[in-house]
Amino acid sequence: MASSSAPPRDLKALYEYFVHNGIGNVLLELLNLKEIGRLDSSNTNSTLRESFLERMGQFKSALFTSLKPRKKDMLQWLIKRGISNVKIMIFNKSSIPLVAWFFRRITMPNLKTIQFNFGGYKGGKMSDVSLNLIGNACPRLNTIIFNYCDKITDAGVIALVEKCPELEIINLNKNGGDEINASLVVIGKKCPKLRSINLSGCKMVTDEGLKGLCQGCPELKTINLNYCDKITDAGVLSLCEKCLKLKKIRLSGCPLVTNKCRASLKLRGSIFKL
């Protein structure tokens, strides 16, 4: 499929590269504001411009490898042309504080998926404020993924899910924050379409949180509870009893979940991943 050579920066060559390789993702680092301006300029060859925009309309995903103020207009431009999934990978500490700045100044009502990966920085400045702003900017989200965002608490998660009732996938993998538990009750009330939730490493999760979650999530099919070391048999069994579509549950590093409970889950069928 795609060649291993670096994509070109020239607009015409970049378009030809996309067409030739059938690329399904847009690496935003390749597009700068000058090139984007040229696309809408009367000086741009109209055939090339229309062909490029038509091709762009087929792309559904965009990737940031950093956040900078100038990229706000870039993302807005792409979203107007059909981008519905955004992945943000932070490898530079200077980009972390810009998350809140970015989402305070942009509106993305049709965005469906947003993913944050913070490399080795563990999302140090990714805070509840950012989650609240993401909820304001992206009310139709159905997938939200936060990896290693250790400053997020119940308050931020609650602010997000109250504004994004269409959420189907929530990933708080190895969040490590001090307060991810009470928000599970709110997720249970506000996210009836939830199909998957990853709470791996969220060490404050308790049976009460799980009981609240399962009250209003009939579509839940997968849950990752690895290293949620406060949960017990009671919380796990409540999930199984209320969430009848549950197909996979992960319980590594859960010392209070007994062998008896695990055996009971196995008897329910091989669909449970222990």
Image (cartoon, rainbow, N blue to C red):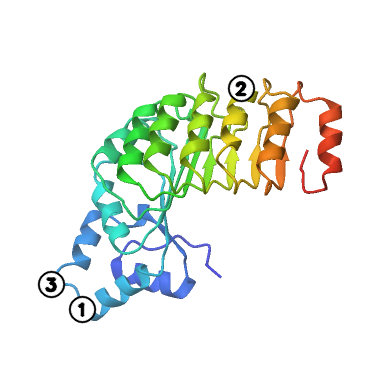
The quadrant where residue 12 appears: bottom left
Q: Residue 46: which numbered mark, if any?
A: 1
- Is 84 placed above or below 66 here? below
Q: Tell me the amino acid under the disc marked 1.
A: Ser
Q: Residues within 10 Å of mark 3 (few under 14, many from 20)?
A: few
Check disc 2 and report its element: helix, strand or loop.
loop
Q: Residue 199: which numbered mark, if any?
A: none
Task: Answer with mark 1 or mark 2, whichever residue precedes in sequence.
Answer: 1
The quadrant where residue 209 appears: top right
Q: Tell me the amino acid under the disc marked 2.
A: Lys
Residue at point 65% right, 24% down?
A: 207
The quadrant where residue 161 appears: top left
Using the numbered discs, state the Cα–Cα distance from disc 1 to disc 3 in whole angstroms.
8 Å
Q: Residues within 10 Å of mark 2 (few under 14, many from 20)?
A: many
Q: Residue furthest bottom?
A: 47
Using the numbered discs, state the Cα–Cα distance from disc 1 to disc 2 in whole angstroms.
56 Å
Check disc 3 and report its element: helix, strand or loop.
loop
Residue 219 appears anywhere in the view: yes
Q: Residues within 10 Å of mark 1 (few under 14, many from 20)?
A: few
Q: Nearer the viewer, mark 1 or mark 2?
A: 2
Residue at point 30% right, 44% down?
A: 137
Q: Give x and y (percent) for residue 228.
A: 66, 26
- Is 80 placed above or below 271 here? below
Q: What residue is disc 2 on?
A: 203
Q: Residue furthest left?
A: 42
Q: Residue 42: which numbered mark, if any?
A: 3
Q: Give x and y (percent) for residue 173.
A: 57, 34
